[in-house]
Image (cartoon, rainbow, N blue to C red):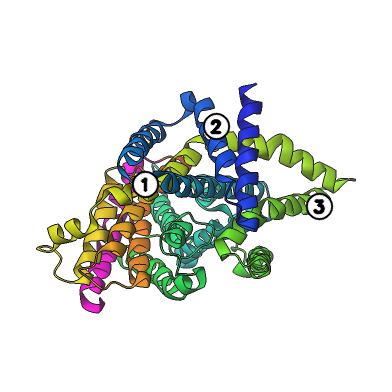
């Protein structure tokens, strides 16, 4: 009974968000918010500790706002809209990820990347991780990480251990670059909701360069740190990267469809993406069922969606709660913070806009290492930076710095899903995968970002 009720609540949340996206109806926050609250209550006993703590914090902040903010109802409305939107974002991406994870095309493409020779394996894995992160998001580390674990040999052997470390860091850094540019990453809607004057294409025009630089620095450090350390394999020839052609065509088709829907409905790329995700997943399932020889592929696809994928979304209960609550907190906390007073307080440490952005970068990274979700720290940083009158900060500059801090955090913090899922997939402790294996890389990236803030901003 609880399972059916939870699934029904998820359906109401999805429908409320979709109706709001298409029609801009204001009433959708009521059924969407009530359904989200009902879902959290139903799943309370199975929620991760972090999710329960965040929800308790949200209740306290909501009560404080109700008692102290004059236009509290409007603010609660906005916070609920944000929570439903980000909650639906998680669900829509979950549907797409589940479909991609069951795709033979995705698995074949993953094997092509993992089986590359040492000379180009790092580049193939790090850029492949970024590409797989588009449809799979953080699920890419589970898919490719499992292949890495079974493909390196006995990790107790020196050469195999080195190969495991290099392949794992390549994958993690590749997937960690996704928040910099991908419309399927939660980071982009956080930016767009906080600074509506920006668009995904404007962000991409700047962050695309940062993402390539992020991946390139990782590749360079890997080459410098492991010069001819692992001999070339004498096994069978690795398949050429041209075998990834069908997968790239699929990604391109998804992106073109999203752009078309965005133009037709006058939506952002991110909103069009989550609106299209369930339909795209259904179509993908139809193609898969047809490839397996199903006589009625549409019926088989609908059965998979209703009997497997939709019920599996309950397993994202903690992710849904953390994302939805973090989005609501980002709205509710800002009016409680005196940005001008805070700006005056940090003036001795931030004598320029670049210094303020550098402090924001350090704040997000350090709190992320201590366990704070980047959704919360980035939202707070944006809210404070955009309201500080002391410095004339451009929104695009704020966006680039907080996106860099997000990518840095999910590369090194053992509390993030990126590091934990990667560590679980390859059978290594999260502390080793995150802080130990990536310390030098993150040190270089952080030095460049902070230096760039002072030099260019």
State left or right for residue 373 relative to residue 443: right
Taking the view exactly as shown, the residue that stands out farthest to the right is: 295
User: Which residue is the site of mark 2?
Assistant: 39
Q: Nearer the viewer, residue 30 or 41?
A: 30
For marks 3 and 2 on the same chain, the one whose residue lies earlier in the sequence: 2
Taking the view exactly as shown, the residue that stands out farthest to the top is: 1
Q: Is residue 453 magenta?
A: yes
Q: Nearer the viewer, mark 2 or mark 1?
A: 1
On screen, 28 above or below 287?
above
User: Which residue is the site of mark 3?
Assistant: 291
User: Which residue is the site of mark 1?
Assistant: 332
Badge 2 marks a residue whose secondary structure is helix
* C-alpha separation, residue under disc 3 versus residue under disc 2: 36 Å
Q: Nearer the viewer, residue 190 or 158?
A: 190
Taking the view exactly as shown, the residue that stands out farthest to the front is: 70
On screen, 94 above or below 183?
above
Badge 1 marks a residue whose secondary structure is helix
């Amino acid at each position: 009974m609880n399972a059916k009720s939870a699934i029904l609540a998820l359906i109401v949340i999805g429908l409320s968000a979709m109706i709001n996206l298409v029609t801009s109806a204001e009433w959708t926050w009521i059924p969407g918010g009530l359904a989200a609250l009902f879902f959290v209550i139903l799943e309370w006993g199975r929620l991760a500790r972090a999710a329960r703590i965040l929800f308790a914090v949200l209740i306290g902040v909501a009560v404080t706002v109700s008692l102290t903010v004059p236009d509290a109802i409007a603010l609660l409305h906005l916070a609920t809209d944000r929570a439903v939107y980000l909650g639906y974002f998680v669900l829509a991406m979950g549907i797409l990820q589940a479909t991609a994870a069951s795709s033979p095309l995705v698995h074949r493409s993953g094997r092509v990347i993992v089986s590359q020779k040492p000379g180009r394996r790092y580049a193939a894995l790090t850029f492949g991780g970024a590409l797989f992160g588009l449809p799979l998001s953080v699920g890419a580390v589970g898919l490719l990480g499992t292949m890495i674990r079974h493909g390196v040999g006995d990790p107790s052997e020196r050469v195999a251990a080195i190969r495991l470390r290099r392949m794992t860091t390549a994958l993690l850094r590749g997937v960690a670059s996704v928040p910099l540019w991908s419309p399927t990453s939660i980071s982009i809607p956080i930016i767009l909701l906080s600074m509506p004057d920006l668009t995904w294409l404007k962000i991409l025009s700047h962050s695309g360069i940062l993402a390539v630089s992020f991946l390139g620095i990782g590749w360079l450090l890997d080459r410098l740190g492991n010069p001819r350390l692992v001999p070339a394999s004498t096994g069978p020839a690795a398949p050429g990267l041209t075998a990834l052609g069908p997968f790239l065509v699929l990604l391109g088709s998804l992106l073109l469809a999203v752009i078309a829907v965005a133009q037709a409905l006058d939506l952002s790329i991110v909103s069009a993406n989550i609106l299209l995700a369930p339909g795209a997943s259904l179509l993908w399932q139809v193609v898969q069922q047809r490839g397996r020889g199903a006589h009625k592929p549409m019926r088989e696809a609908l059965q998979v969606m209703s009997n497997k994928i939709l019920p599996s979304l309950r397993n994202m209960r903690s992710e849904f709660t953390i994302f939805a609550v973090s989005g609501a907190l980002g709205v509710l906390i800002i009016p409680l913070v005196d940005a001008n007073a805070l700006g005056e307080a940090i003036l001795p440490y931030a004598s320029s806009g670049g210094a303020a952005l550098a402090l924001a970068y350090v704040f997000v990274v350090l709190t992320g290492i201590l366990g704070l979700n980047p959704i919360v720290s980035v939202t707070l940083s944006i809210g404070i930076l955009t309201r500080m009158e002391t410095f004339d900060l451009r929104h695009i500059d704020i966006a680039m710095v907080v996106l860099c801090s997000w990518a840095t955090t999910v590369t090194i913090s053992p509390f993030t899903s990126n590091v934990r899922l990667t560590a679980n997939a390859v059978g290594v402790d999260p502390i080793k995968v995150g802080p130990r294996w990536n310390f030098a890389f993150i040190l270089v990236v952080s030095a460049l970002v902070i230096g760039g803030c002072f030099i260019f901003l």
